[in-house]
Amino acid sequence: MSGADGVFTRSFRVITALVLIVWLVLPLIPLGIWSFAKGWFFPDLLPRVWTLDAWEYALSDTAGVMDSLGLTIYISVCATALSILVGVPAGRALGMYRFRGKAAVELAILAPTIVPGIAVALGIHSVFIWLGLANTVNGVILVHLIPTIPYMTLVMAGVFANHDPAFEQQARSLGATPLKTFWYVTLPAILPGIVVGGLFAFLVSWSQYILTLLIGGGRVVTLPLLLFNFATSGRNDIAGAIGMIYILPGVIILCLTARHLSGRSSAVGGYGRL
Amino acid sequence: MRNHLFCAALAATTALAMPSLADTADGDALNAMAWDEVVELARGGEVNFFLWGGSDGINRYVSEYIGGILADEYDITLNRVGLSDTSEAVNLVLGEKEAGVTDAGAVDMIWINGENFRTMKQGGLAYCGYTDLLPNNAYVNWENPSIANDFGVPVDGCEVPWSTAQFAFAYDTARFDDPPRSIPVLLDWIKANPGQFTYPALPDFNGAVFVRHVFYHAAGGVENLLGPFDQAVYDEVAAKTWDILNDIEPYLWREGATYPNSIVTLQQLYANQEVDLIFDYEPATVGVNIENGTYPPTTQGYALTDGTIGNTNYTIIPFNSPNKAAALVLQNLLLSPAAQAQKALPDVWGAQPAIDITRLPEDDAALFASIERHPNVVDPEELAAVALPELQASWTAAIEQGWIENVGSN
């Protein structure tokens, strides 16, 4: 009986995985083909003329894609690290403790995901000008925290809601310092949550357009800015080539962290209580 | 309190960390100088040029050709900032003005015209009164009303022309012969060929100029529409225009149930043979899009016998640009006969010059005479033979709003 059940679960898993892969990868195929095409007209199944022109442009100094790739990675990594620094303690407070005004704090943290960025961007711009942060990379990193922190905090709140502080108390009673307790007990327990939240934060920062343009003042040119230029001008070939470069870091990070993303990971349910 | 202290400290350190470049934010001081002094001030500096970034050809021309000359001859670093929409740069300057940034703006120059220029000029966001300073300004014919007025708004020395453009249609010669060559013929053609024509929904720039052609036709000529906005004339002509457009709507692509949201969408519809006709305010687009593979190579541009609307596009320097001297050097370079001729080459950009060829020395004029236009782009002289002026912005705004209320929302 249990054998048949196992086969069913396994085939269900395989089918789900296939559907997900098709759903995620299929839209990327035309994009990849376009990046090597010179014209692709109905009703041709494949382009008639193949060329490396789009890639040649995308990799040229004029396009600035490679410089922008390095800068975008730097900004997103910094924004992710800062989100973790803020999101882990904030998530612990929200997930483990009850306090006066908790609902208001939760709403305030969620607000940036509800309010459209453009509505606040102009106001933030004038504040950042006053602070001397406009047109700087640091300013762009800081402003990216607005949309990234909610994701990080919410994931960590979920992890800490299922986290039992008794684990930590036990380590302390056995003589571990607070730092050791965090390093050997708390961190391993919440690490999958940090990975998942960090992945969210990275991808949210990675895809920012209007906040980067406004706060960066055009001096801080990230990949979405370059990509959007060509996506909106109908140049499917160059948008395809830049798009292929654009999705690389996301795909690499996804592959590296995939094992933390399955249902068996503690990022979803935590390790339960003692 | 602690927060405030932190912010103040942060602001102070960032201010200290800012490099003290040769600041040329004071436009009045520059206006009083000789050109050589301006060039000396600009040397070794940088200039941030914000322009639509959706064409690899234009990007290459600006970054490589113009940027190369700036670096080699003037030691100026050109930072080309690509935009998806020009209003993004205008909003940046507007935000800076509201925040009190009067001499340290991020934007040194914008490629601009029409509505965005009106916003800049009316908002006091433009640096003005310098055009006589530029040596190559001598090649600009400011007597020409279509240069001296940007969509009906007097330029008043607040921007410098870069290129001219004129609306033109195009069709695929491999699919049919004899396209409709005037607005009344087109209106009949649409009914005879249901589903084969559409235009982008307003406020798309190109959709709006198509509707203005129908508006001119309904008015029986543009002569009655020139000058300031006239409500009585507008009401009469607009009613006729909406009747015409609503009348053809069932014969448009998808029975007119929906309109493409932008010229780019219309270009894709044309490329995929869903519609038969395409148009563009920049006639060179036909050549550019054939060469980059967007259009079939059998696409041919053509003019209308009853005329098409022309415009000029410009470059503007914001009031708070800290690199005005370098921006002036860039503007002067953009106006030079060599740079204008390079821009007119079909494999570079194909844009028509904004300078008056008849004012050039003989060898410079020969440069333009030797340019062979892309064979599929309509002959600029054929187009210019029947050029129609643009209306003032108050008219164009009213027509846009009227279309949205009376045609688009039906």
Image: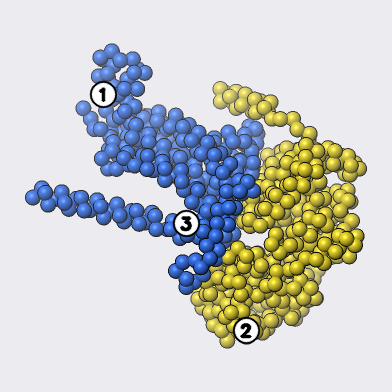
Q: Position of residue B349 (x, y in %)?
A: 70, 61
> In front: mark 1 or mark 3?
3
Q: Residues within 10 Å of mark 3 (few under 14, many from 20)?
A: some
Residue for point 65% across, 82% down: B180
Question: Subunit of mark 2?
Answer: B
- The quarter holding residue B57 reads bottom right
Residue placed under numbered mark 3 in the picture: A32
Residue placed under numbered mark 1 in the picture: A167
Pointers 3 and 2 in contact (C-beta within 8 Å): no
Q: Could you tell whether A152 is left or right of B56 in the image?
A: left
How far apart, in angstroms, are the residues tagged by discs 3 and 2?
A: 36 Å
- The secondary structure type at the circle numbered 1 is helix
Q: N-terminal of the two: label 1 or label 3?
A: 3
Question: Subunit of mark 3?
Answer: A
Question: Subunit of mark 1?
Answer: A
Q: Are marks 3 and 2 on the same chain?
A: no
Quadrant holding the C terminus of chain B:
bottom right
> Which label number is shown at residue B177?
2
Q: Position of residue B399 (x, y in %)?
A: 67, 69
Q: Which chain is yellow?
A: B
Question: Which amino acid does the dot numbered 1 rest on?
Answer: Phe
Viewer-proximal residue among A187 and B368: B368
Q: Residue furthest left?
A: A1
Q: Could you tell whether A181 is left or right of B151 in the image?
A: left
- The secondary structure type at the circle numbered 3 is helix
- The secondary structure type at the circle numbered 2 is loop
Residue for point 66% across, 77% down: B241
Name the colour assigned to chain A in the rendering: blue
Q: Are marks 1 and 3 on the same chain?
A: yes
Q: Could you tell whether A241 is left or right of A4 in the image?
A: right
Residue for point 34% across, 53% down: A21
Q: Residues within 10 Å of mark 1 (few under 14, many from 20)?
A: some
